[in-house]
Amino acid sequence: MSVISFATSKGGAGKTTACIVLGTTFADQLKVSIIDADPAHRVNRWAEKGPYPKSITVIKCADENRIMDVIEAEQEKSDVVLVDLEGVASKLNSYVFSMSDLVIVPTGDEQQDVEDAILTLKQIKLDSRASRRDIPAKVLFARTKAAVKSRLEKKLNKQMRDNVDCFEAELKTRTAFSSIHNSGGNLDSLPSDVSGVDKAKENAREIAKEIIATFQQAKQEAVA
């Protein structure tokens, strides 16, 4: 089934958070495999902290010699396979890109985040040439303000949107999202004292819906 990878060359851009949040959101209706291919293994640490939905399988694999076999095996079991990649250019990343139906590149409204997102997109284009197929990639603004953005943030956001393919929805900075790393589980299982859970759920569903629409549009264009 569909393979979605999460890649960025900069730490702290929201890559792992996006992978976990979207994985647990998809799990409401789909069978999901999450492959933790980042040597830091933050997804695996999340999985060990609390029970996650039974429709999710978490696999730890940062071995470039095994990663393609692992992805193929999980494709047989799940509706969607998510892969959290390491934050550097590597053979492993290139192998995963070659198998991805979509690469999500998270970035914040900061100059360094935007620059690193552009570098990641360039690497994906190089891998597209090497694999002789178009590898779809889309930027996801993450860790962005839920309230009003500064003038610089708005400028950087617009510049990126004017030049590369970006999701309309943004993964906002919310306590509920960051709390998942501390407590494990999903948004439904967070402690009662965590604020803004309903808004976080709505935000996550909005992005998940846009991802599904992206795949549907790609299928329509392929038929046409």
Image: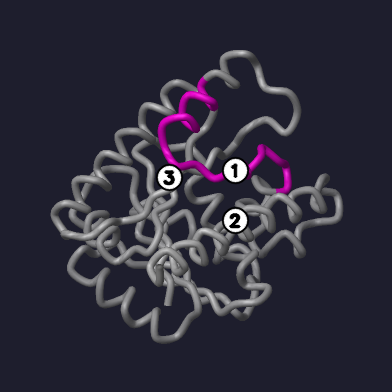
The residue sitting at 57% across, 14% down in the picture is 152
Q: Which mark is residue 168?
A: 1
- Quarter location, residue 175: top right
Quickly name the residue at label 2.
Answer: 210
**Quarter in which the N terminus is drawn:** bottom left
When the figure is inspected, residue 11 is found, relative to residue 48, above or below; the finding is above
Q: Whole-percent x and y of residue 10?
A: 38, 35
Residue 140 point in image, percent of width and height: 51, 43
Look at the numbered discs 1 and 2 and tell me whether their residues touch, using CB distance below 8 Å. Answer: yes
Query: Which residues are the magenta region?
Result: 156-176
Q: Is residue 15 left or right of residue 143?
A: left
Asked if the magenta segment contains residue 165, the reply would be: yes
Q: Secondary structure at mark 2?
A: helix
Q: Which quarter of the figure has residue 150?
A: top right
Give the camera-side residue of 188 and 155. Answer: 155
| Label of residue 105 in the image | 3
- Estimate how packed mark 2 is, as few (under 14), some (14 to 19) or many (20 or more) residues with alpha carbons within 10 Å: some
Question: Residue 39, percent across and down?
Answer: 33, 54
Q: Where 22 sits versus 143, above or below?
A: below
**Residue type pointed to by label 1:** Glu
The image quadrant where one finds the C terminus is bottom left
Say which quarter of the image contains residue 132: bottom left
* Alpha carbon distance from label 3 to label 1: 13 Å
Q: CA distance from mark 2 to mark 3?
A: 15 Å
Upstream in sequence: badge 3 or badge 1: 3
The amino acid pointed to by label 3 is Val
Q: What residue is shown at x 49% (from left), y 59% (from top)?
A: 43
Looking at the picture, the colour scheme in use is: one colour
Horizontal arrangement in the rendering, residue 117 relative to residue 62 (left or right): right
Taking the magenta stretch, the answer to whether it contains residue 195 is no
Helix, strand or loop for disc 3: strand
